[in-house]
Image: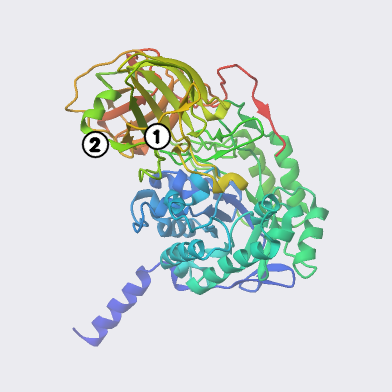
Amino acid sequence: MTILTRSLLALLLLASLPTQAQKKHTFIIKDGQFLYDGKPTQIHSGEMHYARVPQPYWRHRLKMMKALGLNTVATYVFWNYHNTAPGVWDFKTGNHNVAQFVKTAQEEGLFVILRPGPYACAEWEFGGYPWWLQKNKDLVIRANNQPFLDSCKVYINKLAGQVKDLQVSKGGPIIMTQVENEFGSYVDQRKDIPLEEHRKYNAAIKQQLIEAGFEGPFFTSDAAGLFEGGATPGALPTANGEGNVEALKTAVNQYHGSQGPYMVAEYYPGWLDHWGEPFVRVPTEQVTQQVETYLKNGINFNFYMVHGGTNFGFTSGANYSKEHDIQPDITSYDYDALISEPGWATPKYTAVRALMQKYVKYAVPAVPAQLPVVTIPDIILEKSVDVFDLKNDIQPVRSIQPLSFEELNQGSGYVLYSRRFGPAAQGQLAVPGLRDYATVYVNGQLVGELNRQDNRYTLPVQIPANGTLELLVENMGRINYGAEIVHNVKGIIEPVTLDGSVLIGDWQMYKMPFDKVPDLTRYISKNKEGRPALYTASFDVMQPGDTFLDMRDWGKGIVFVNGHNLGRYWKIGPQQTLYVPGCWLTKGKNEVVVFEQQNKKLQQALKTVDKPILDELLSAKPAKTSTP
C-alpha cells in the first residue's frame, strides 16, 4: 500500500466520523450565567425518560422536542432498570442502551442533562433503587450509611463507564449532571436524622460522581423553600415548580454566591396520576403564561414532563397519604404532557411551540408527522388457563409463617400464599402486613379482596374441615417518594390471624413473578368465574401501527404482546386502555397473553381503539384540574 493510498484512507476514515463527536466544547457556570464555548446560553429543556419510550421511537420523540423549540433533553437514569439482578447489569439491550439515547439526542441537535440519582423518584418503582437492597439488614437507604454508599458507588461507576465520554468536554452532548434528587424534601421529612448526617450523604454522592469521571457542572433540584437540606457545595441549586421569578432568584442567591444562573429544573405542565383518582389536567393557558414569564426573564427551565411515555411492565411506583396506605401510579405516564403518551402533539404543545418561536433566537424545525395508528378487529381469545393449575409446575416454598417477596428472592409480580386447615375454622381474617393487593380464596372459591390502597386488611371467612385458604398477593409498585420509601418490603410481611389467632405452620408460597410470558402450551383450556386466568390469542396485523387495548370490560391484571409486558390495567380507572407501540407489532401473526386476576366475567375477545382512554373512573368522577 502506497503512502498516498494510506493518506487517502485516513482522510476517508476521519470524514466518516460524526463532526460533533470530533469537536470538544466547554459548558461552564461563570458570572451568573451558563456559558457554552464562552457564550451565554439559555437552557430550554424537556424531560423524557428513555426507559419509558420504546427505543425505535426515541428519535421521533427527540425530533418532537426540537420542533417544540427546545435545545435540551433531560433524563433520569433508573438504577434498577440497569442493575436487573444482583451483579447483573444491562446497558445494551433495547431501551437499556443509555449511551445510544445520549448519542441520538446529539444527532438531533440537543444537549443532554443527566439525572443519575442514585435516587430518582419519578413515579418509578422504588424511586429507581433495586429491590434487593432491602435484603441487607445493615444497609440504610438514602443515608450516610457505608453499605448503602458502597452500593451507590458500584452503580455510579458502572454508569460512568457508559456515558462519561459523552460529556460536552469530550465532544458529547451532556452538559450537566444532577447530584441526588429532591433531597431537600427527604431531609424535611426525616428530621429524626441530624441535618449534618444528611449533608454528609449528599456530599458523598457528589464526590462519587466526581471520582467516577463526571465533570459537571453539577446541580441539585428542590423546592425553593427546601434548599437548606438539598443544596450542596459545588452544585448549582435549582428550584422545582417555582413560578415566581423573584422567589427563585432569592432562594438561589442565598445558596449560590448571590448570583445565578437561575433555573427551574422541573416545571410541571401536567401531573402524576394514581389508580382510583381523577386524571389530572393542567390548563394550556396556565402553562403558556408561566413559560412566557420564564422566557421574558431569562429563566432556564425544564418541562417535567415534556413527554412521559409509559410505565411498562412492573415499573410504576407509588405514593401514600393520610387516607391511603399506598397510592399506586397508573401504567400510563402521559402526565398531561405537551407530547402525549403515544407521541402526539397536544394543543398545549402547539401553543407552547408558537411561544418558543416568538422568543428563541435559533431556528425551530417543522413538527414531525404523527406515527401511524391502527385498530385491529376483535381479537378472539383462543385459550384460557386457570392460574391455579400453574401450581403443579412450581416448587412451593414452605414456612411456618408467610414470607415476604424479598425473603422469597422475588422483586415483583405475584405470590400465591396457601395454607391447609385441619378442623373447620371461621372468623375475621386479618392480614395487616398485606403489601399490596390480594384476592382471597377458600377451596378455590373467591371470597373477597383485600387492598392496601383502601386500607382494607380484614375479611370474614368460613373454612371447612380440611379446607384450603389461598391469597394471591400482588406487589402494586414500591413507594418512590417520602419517608416511607425505607419501608418497601412486599408480599405478606406480618403474621396473618383468623379470629384473633395467629395462623402458624404449613404455609406454602408459589412464586409467580411473570417477568416473562408464561409458557402455556402444556396446559389445557380451563376457566371459571372468580378464579384468576391466563387468556391467550394470536392475531394478524396487515400494517403495524400504534394501537390501544380497550380493557374497560376486564377487571385487573397485566397484558403481554409479543413478549412485551404492556403494564397493569385496572377497571377502577382512570386509565382504561393500554398503549401498544406499533414497533412491537409485526406484519402478520402476533401473540397476546392476558393475566386477569379477578376474572369475575369470562372473556371472549379483546378489543382495540384508536386513542387512549385515561380519564374514565369507574365512579365517573370528573377529571381533575390541577395547579401543581
Identify the secondary structure beneath mark 1: strand
Q: Amino acid at mark 2?
A: Gln
Residue indicated by mark 1: 566
Reply above or below: 508 against 464. Answer: below
- Precedes in sequence: disc 2 or disc 1: 2
Name the residue nearer the viewer: 178 or 43.
178
Q: Quadrant of residue 72?
A: bottom right
Reply above or below: 574 against 234. Answer: above
Identify the secondary structure beneath mark 2: loop
Task: Measure the alpha-carbon separation of dots 2 and 1.
Answer: 28 Å
Residue located at (35% from left, 46% from top) = 409
Q: Position of residue 350 (x, y in %)?
A: 62, 38
Q: Position of residue 299 (x, y in %)?
A: 73, 56
Quadrant containing the C terminus in the rendered view: top right
Reply above or below: 315 against 324. Answer: below
Residue located at (42% from left, 18% from top) = 554
In the displayed structure, does residue 223 sit left or right of residue 413?
Answer: right
Dot 1, how many residues are within 10 Å of its Cα: few (below 14), some (14-19), or many (20+)?
A: many
